Amino acid sequence: MDTLLLRLDESVTGLFGQWNLWTSAIFTVLAGFLTYQIATRQDPDTHPFLLARQAQGSAVRQPGESPIYRAQGSPHGMPLNASLNVKDPGASKWSRGRDGDLRDIWRQAVAGVQEDGPTKGATGRILTVLGTDKAIEHQLGDITRQINLIGQHIADQGGNRVAIYLPNSVELIATLFACAFYDLTAVILPFDEPVDAIISMLRRSAADTVVTAPGSFPFDVVVNSYPALRQLIWVVDEGSKHMDWNEVPQGTGSSVNVSTWQDIINDSPVDAGKNLPRLDEQEAPRDVTVFWQSKPGQQEEMVRFTSANLISGVAAQIFAVSTSQRIGPSDLFLPADSLANTHTLVLTLAALFSNASVAFNSVAPQADDLTVATRGVSPTILVATPAALLKTHQDSIARVNASLVTRALHRMRVRKLTQSGAMPIAAAAGGPGNKLRLILTADRAGAASPRLSSAVLADLRVLTGARIVYALTAARVAGAAAQTGFFDYRVSEAEQGGGCHFGPPLTSTEIVLRDMGAWKSGDEGSKGEIVVRGPCVAGNEAALGVAGMMRDDNTLTYV
């Protein structure tokens, strides 16, 4: 024992006797590296096994088709997600709620959080963003009054099919809910379209009422070309209220009833319209008609969604968000894509039903940069176009690559994100807002829109500090056909450009790949035309006209 202690003493003495400046430097580097690894260590945000097989294929497949793929949350043999599980006042919390319809979304937004907890009764805010430093808050009670008065006015004037030609705004959402509450058909037109396209959409939808803004709607031309128009409601901004908008231009020979949104509201009694109409379970709201344009210059495809289609899409989007990251009153939701796009509309309805605050910016959908789209507001959840994300990526990467230090730091964070499966604690280059936590974007099937590779998505997650969900949308699908998992940060280096995929189907859809030319399903894998089925699909089934395949992890991608 004495000999052992003597040798240990000699070893320690010899070690420190040889200690010099180089030894100190090496020790400091090693100690700093180990300390950094321990201090910044994060567990993966989700278990890797959940990413290895993200959808279930049916045990049997039909000739000429692949197996039917479903999300893990809606296994085969169970109905697809079609319900908001709306609980009426006084109902047991253990009982199954109603599927719900569009009217229940606004009722929930007004009522606030119903579940027991610290946020019980909390409601979101509705904001209109003006310029770079001004945001106007709208009281929920005032919007309820607008819904009632506008809906009643249109119904009293004999309106039946209401075309909404507005940019993203409170009035667009209020008109949509007015149609739901007052048994009217809503027709949402893409904004800022050529005159001939507007007239074509009005004819095809047989609209008799138009809600629009001055300066964007060619009234004279439309009245002369579309005599079926019977009612027009101008949404006038603050700077134009002094003008007379109720007069029909001379020479048109039209009997169109012209009024303004503000006059309808202001000329009504103060106490009128404060309470929503009673809910009649026997009558569901009418269909919502939208237009889908795949390519510029191509005629838009007109699609009629039932209220049940939209509710199924909303329910699936709410379910798709992890429980720990659910949308709630603490979130500020900004749709920086057009509400005429059903993907953006469904996500906005989901935010309203989740009692999140919602900000409307009429110019955000035209912005090609997230920094521009988010001026004047700091959202926590953002819906953006792939083009805007690509522009943001190009600008941010250029700034990162300007310095060797920032470039090395960015690469380290990307590697940690993709290999460890954990979001970095802080963004490398900053983003459009330090509160941003989730970005939702989508590829339009069959459209000439830019696609986001998994490598670009990984860069953007690090650059913005937000998780990104990438979806596949189609004309006849309310919401999305498939979208990436909330915690799926992987980069596929095997495919060209880093590859991309759209994740598994949602809980409201199932996907089958039907043989298409050279793309066939067999022992080597599932390939073919993407066909989507489910309660969120208009007509319950839609062939997208594009070829796709299922990867080894059962996520959908283009061939």
Image: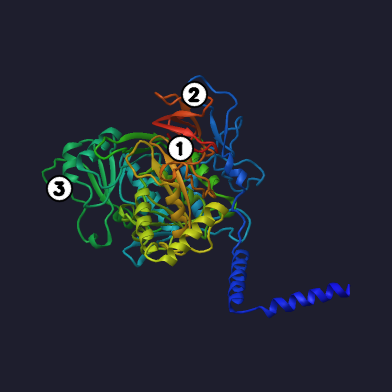
- Which of 244 and 201 lies nearest the eye of the viewer? 201
Kindly report the distance in space between the C-alpha atoms of the residues bearing marks 3 and 1.
53 Å
Asked if residue 299 can be seen in this view, the reply is yes
Q: Amino acid at mark 2?
A: Glu
- The residue sitting at 51% across, 26% down in the picture is 66
Quadrant assignment for the C terminus: top left
Task: Please tell me the numbered disc located at residue 540.
Answer: none
- Left or right, 334 with respect to 253, comes to right
- Left or right, 316 with respect to 131, comes to right
Labels 3, 2: front one: 2
According to the picture, the residue beneath numbered tag 1 turns out to be: 557
Question: Which element carries disc 2, helix, strand or loop?
Answer: loop
Label located before the other in sequence (1 or 2)? 2
Q: Count the numbered circles shown.
A: 3
- Which of 1 and 467 lies nearest the eye of the viewer? 1
Taking 82 as reference, is 372 above or below it?
below
According to the picture, the residue beneath numbered tag 3 turns out to be: 249
Question: Which element carries disc 1, helix, strand or loop?
Answer: strand
Expressed as whole percent of the image width and height from the top left, the position of residue 421 reads 56, 52
Label located before the other in sequence (3 or 1)? 3
Expressed as whole percent of the image width and height from the top left, the position of residue 121 reads 56, 58
Circle 3 crowding by C-alpha within 10 Å: few under 14, some 14–19, many from 20: few
Kindly report the distance in space between the C-alpha atoms of the residues bearing marks 3 and 2.
58 Å
- The residue sitting at 19% across, 45% down in the picture is 219
Taking 108 as reference, is 538 above or below it?
above
Circle 2 crowding by C-alpha within 10 Å: few under 14, some 14–19, many from 20: many
According to the picture, the residue beneath numbered tag 2 turns out to be: 65
Taking 308 as reference, is 169 above or below it?
below
Labels 3, 1: front one: 1
Label located before the other in sequence (3 or 2)? 2
Q: Amino acid at mark 1?
A: Thr
- The residue sitting at 33% across, 65% down in the picture is 132
